[in-house]
Amino acid sequence: MSTSREDAASADIGVIGGSGFYSFLDDIEEVRVETPYGTPSDVIALGELAGRRVAFLPRHGRDHRYPPHKIPYRANLWALRSLGVRQVLAPSAVGSLTPEYGPGTLAVPDQLADRTHGRAQTFYDEGGAVHLSFSDPYCPAGRRAAADSAKAAGWRPVEGGTLVVIEGPRFSTRAESQWFAAQGWTLVGMTGHPEAVLARELALCYTPLCLVTDLDAGIEEGDGVTMEEVLRVFGENIDRLRTLVADVVGALPAERGCPCPRVLDGIKLPLELP
Ligand SMILES: CSC[C@H]1O[C@H](OP(=O)(O)O)[C@H](O)[C@@H]1O
Ligand SMILES: Nc1ncnc2[nH]cnc12
């Protein structure tokens, strides 16, 4: 069943679906949320899963209308927080910069390198400077829950590693790809930034769930990556990824003992958070 309404609705876990991940929950209620940063990528689906209230938002829109550099990241994160969300799971299709981690591998990186440019990447751009720690960009409790759930479900997850986020929408050249790998970076995507830092700025837990769809251009024998290849491989893995995300929802601690909720303590914010 699906209804549409504007009034109060809530969730405590948000799932932001990526390429090929356009629906998630059953028995949903759909809400349209407007924010000071514009309209989110799509209506947000609310439902119940594993005893938790969950909000699902496809970051590109259900029809994949937003390319990675045009996604309304600030509106998306603000909207989720305004619904009550405090923990975010972020499934994403990524390229691998490590030959051993081939298509179908699940990775839960612990670091991020930003190679984007020109994207709005902060809520705090007027009314006073706010500088938050981002040395560890992801929620440690979320990463633990993700890796443990993946192992329990028979995946062999790659724990740790660095996701480099490129501006896109084009894929990397072979030289760029080889350069990224030479830095020790292990995964490449186009949406992990500024999504993670905006979550941090709203004191949300943010956990990436990266599904490798291809070996990026630098380690690829063939013609290089294509969008068709990414979507095909993602489609081959979507059922087990959906199941995994549901497992992680059930494994996330209801009480947040991680540092994420305290990141804004003692900081004078130039705006009121929803
Ligand atoms: C569909 S090809 C490239 C596209 O796939 C990834 O999307 P997402 O991170 O939302 O799963 C990548 O970041 C690009 O946006
Ligand atoms: N090779 C790649 N580069 C950037 N984003 C991706 N998403 C999936 N595969 C990718």
Image (cartoon, rainbow, N blue to C red):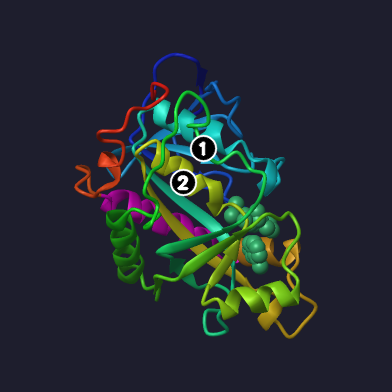
- Residue 155 is left or right of residue 125, and the answer is left
Residue 83 included in the magenta stretch of the image: no
Local crowd at mark 1 within 10 Å, few (<14), some, or many (≥20)? some
Percent position of residue 145, x then y = 29, 59
- Residue corresponding to mark 2: 197
Q: Amino acid at mark 2?
A: Val
- Residue corresponding to mark 1: 122
**Numbered mark located on residue 182 in the image:** none
Q: Do residues under tags 2 and 1 come within 8 Å of each other at their CB atoms?
A: yes
Disc 2 from disc 1: Cα separation: 8 Å
Q: Amino acid at mark 1?
A: Thr
For the point 47% across and 51% down, which residue is it? 90
For the point 59% across and 52% down, which residue is it? 191
Q: Which residues are magenta?
A: 236-252
Figure quadrant of residue 83: top left
Residue 231 visible to an observer of this rendering = yes
